[in-house]
Image (tube, helix red, strand yellow):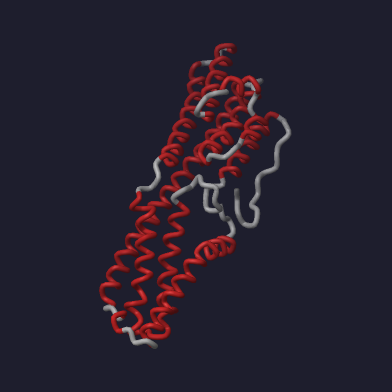
Amino acid sequence: MIVDQRIGLRIISKEIFGVILLVAAWDLIVVILFQVFHQEWMEQPSLPTSLIGSALALFMGFRSNSAYARWWEARTLWGSITNNSRSFGRQVGTLLKDRPDLMMGMAAYPHALRGALGNVDVSADVNRLLPPEMAKAIAGWRNQPNAILYQLGLGVSDEVAKKGIDGAVHGQIDRILSDLANAQGGLERIRNTPLPMQFSALPRALVNVFCIVLPLSMVQTLEWITPLGSSLVGILFLVLDKSANDLQEPFASTPHALPMAAMARTIEIDVVQPTGLPLPPPITAVNGIQP
């Protein structure tokens, strides 16, 4: 995730720079054909283009809101993962006691989850934290994060039965695991349900068509400064399209995605610290980007 606004502006500018050059080149071609070669057929009425631009702006705004809502829901669910992981670590440490393996399993859980969501290799972090017996038990499971939650539930049940702990306490800890499973299910729903084609591929096609038609309706009024006016309007729509396209995939390996590695490391530190075991350093932003 981009945490430095200057870096963010630089990244977006770099990503759309090539398209901006194409738009400006087309605007210049239109001006030359109209002003120098007097191609009258290129003169088009401005009213239809204005109406199309207004409708496109509303559509792009709605699409941007939908993409941001998707990104923010994913961030909210990760916040629930963070809070419930901390609560589980506290309950295990204060109520069950003498079960650092359960706390280490919980520390491994967010790493396994970010690996499943982002389709990245997190075996180094998971193997470093997950107790060997738990790692052996979940081997071969298709959903590794869910398998860890299952093993944590078994560990809690065994400890409750062994120590004769009140059932209300067991229910309280199990409710935390259920909340984690619910948050994980919400994140998986976002990953497995992309935005419809109307909100992904179609907006870019419409923006490209609009940028082609726009200078044709401006050239008779702006003449030689048409590339300036048309390019500025085109840049606005291109930025809207690029921003929404980045936000609609919150788990992708891009600078605009959620900082799942940093969040997982934060959970790991908070859960492991009470055990007294060595802690890794927090993951900090690199060049204005939080991984």
Where is 27 relative to 56, above or below?
below
Which quadrant holds residue 3? bottom right
Q: Position of residue 130 (x, y in %)?
A: 63, 27
Tell me the residue at 46%/35% (across/down). 183
Nearer to us in this view, 6 or 35: 35
Q: Is residue 226 left or right of residue 261?
A: left
Tell me the residue at 56%/55% (across/down). 2
Nearer to us in this view, 290 or 203: 203
Tell me the residue at 39%/53% (across/down). 200
Nearer to us in this view, 134 or 176: 134
Which quadrant holds residue 131? top right
Which quadrant holds residue 161? top right
Nearer to us in this view, 288 or 84: 288
Tell me the residue at 28%/78% (across/down). 44
Question: Is residue 83 at least partly visible in the picture?
Answer: no
Where is 221 relative to 23, above or below?
below
Question: Please, which residue is most extreme toward the front here?
Answer: 37
Q: Position of residue 190 (x, y in %)?
A: 42, 41
Q: Position of residue 33 (x, y in %)?
A: 38, 83
Q: Is residue 88 left or right of residue 49?
A: right
Question: Is residue 241 at least partly visible in the picture?
Answer: yes
Q: Position of residue 156 (x, y in %)?
A: 56, 19
Where is 221 relative to 171, above or below?
below
**How many numbered marks appear?**
0
